[in-house]
Image: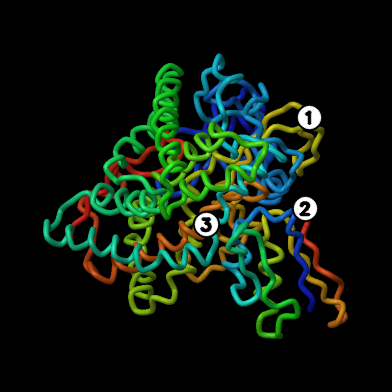
Amino acid sequence: MRVEVDRDTCVGSGNCVHFAPAVFDQDDRDGLVVVLAESPEPALRAATRTAALNCPVGAISVDRTHSGSPPVRPAP
Amino acid sequence: MTETADAVTTGTERPDFPLDRRRCPLAVPQEYEVMREENPLAPVTNRMTGKPVWALTRYRDVRQVLGDPSMSSNARNPSYPAQFHVPEEMLPYIAFPFPAMDPPEHTVRRRMVIPEFTAARINKLRPRMQQIVDTQIDQMLAKGGPLDLMAELALPVPALLFCEMLGVDPVHIGYFRRYAETTTGRDSSQEAVAGAIAEMDEFLDELITEKTKNPGDDLLSRIAARLPDEPTLEHEDLVAIARVLVIAGSDTTANVVSLGTVLLLQHPEQLAELKADPSLWPGAVEELLRFLSILDSATVRVATHDVEVSGGTIRQGEGVLALNGAANWDPERFPEPEKFDIHRNAEGHMAFSYGNHMCPGANLARMQLETVFRTLFERIPDLRLAADVDKLSYMFDAHAYGLHELPVTW
């Protein structure tokens, strides 16, 4: 699993940190998303997907190509 | 079927929305159920303006509309389905806060405040929040029941913390509350709203001028310090930002505390589980937020082009009430939505809205609610209502649903 974020789209809701605090954080200076774990370990993948699906602006994409599944990209 | 639901379903008339009554005071209006099934894009009348507007009640439609950046939040648009009495003659002059704006104006203003609400910053506030809650509960225990939980705990706790965050003397809490009541009151006259805004702007203008000259370690000082880096913003824009913060941090959390306390006391088995295992509180708070959806009708938009939803087409220039409480009770997304269940996965609820206007203070609210509820039921485990649940003073007609007072004892 590979995590990508679009900081231009991010609105700093902090929802991703709420769902997956080991994978996402917010930059102290601008409040926007920071990825802590670009390739989250298996135990964190479900929470990472939840964070991606619940990002209010679809700024998180989770690529699951390595596990053979299609990429999950939340609707904008 | 109620008359309102009947009218909405058959399209014979456009009933006034948001609704100002509930058959079951702790549930979202019952009419939503029929609307969701039979008329998910319902033609209604905006009670605030008397103008026609659509009401959406299905989860996927509400989520689509709130998540669509082309659905405008611009309160200057004459078709914007305002939920406040904004005096029309003030429309061209009033500096709207960013929730009533679209990108790019919205983006630059929102970005002024989001560093203040990061999860890390909110976590650092936990010990102080705990102290504030403990102090209020000490006072409650010293006084003894019965007392009004709204006045003794639900209102002061979030307000005290928020004043410290903003860097404002808590002596102004009462003023902020009256301001919120006037400007969000459905019965407030346009003159009263205009007067309250002008007075608050003067107050905040002075305050921010002082914070610019003599900055402290607080939110308003830091946003004032960021101003020189934002060429498109002026001092007046900070005043407008502060104006919305004053409202947002005033009653919202308090209403979830009061209604949430009633709901939890109605579910003693689940409350017992929470007392025995405090790690269940974060999940319970999400379910409380979903179930209560106190800002059901705060999520409104106006279409800037034709948009297809499951019930039909919203045409360019038409307003829409994307009822987040109706969405949060859509059985397609949350099975048996009327069942309060702390073990439910309430993830994806839109009580904080959705899209680029999602509440920047969501994690602050979550932290506050967890601390208040956990501490309240830990320190006063025998807490109970001192009035009949059906006879409580529910604010059926308010912008943010809640209680005027909540008599409790132990």
Position of the N terminus of chain B, as image quadrant, is top right
Question: Residue B44: which numbered mark, if any?
Answer: none
Residue B242 against residue B329 in the figure, above or below: above
Residue position for label 1: B315
Residue type at mark 3: give it.
Phe
Residue A44 on image: x %, y %: 66, 80
Residue count near mark 2 (Cα–Cα under 10 Å), binned few <14, some 14–19, many ≥20: some
Residue position for label 3: B117
User: Between B186 and B34, which is closer to the camera in this rendering?
Assistant: B186
Q: Chain of mark 2?
A: A
Residue B306 on image: x %, y %: 81, 33
User: Between B324 and B38, which is closer to the camera in this rendering?
Assistant: B324
- Res. B327 visible in picture: yes
Q: Chain of mark 3?
A: B
Residue lying at 51% horizontally and 53% vertically, measured from the top left: B361
Residue B187 on image: x %, y %: 41, 24
Residue B58 against residue B244 in the figure, above or below: below
Residue position for label 2: A76
Residue count near mark 1 (Cα–Cα under 10 Å), binned few <14, some 14–19, many ≥20: some
Q: Are marks 2 and 3 on the same chain?
A: no
Where disc 1 sits, the SS reads loop
Where disc 3 sits, the SS reads helix
**Callout 1 touching callout 3 (CB < 8 Å):** no
Residue B402 against residue B284 in the figure, above or below: above
Residue lying at 55% horizontally and 24% vertically, measured from the top left: B94
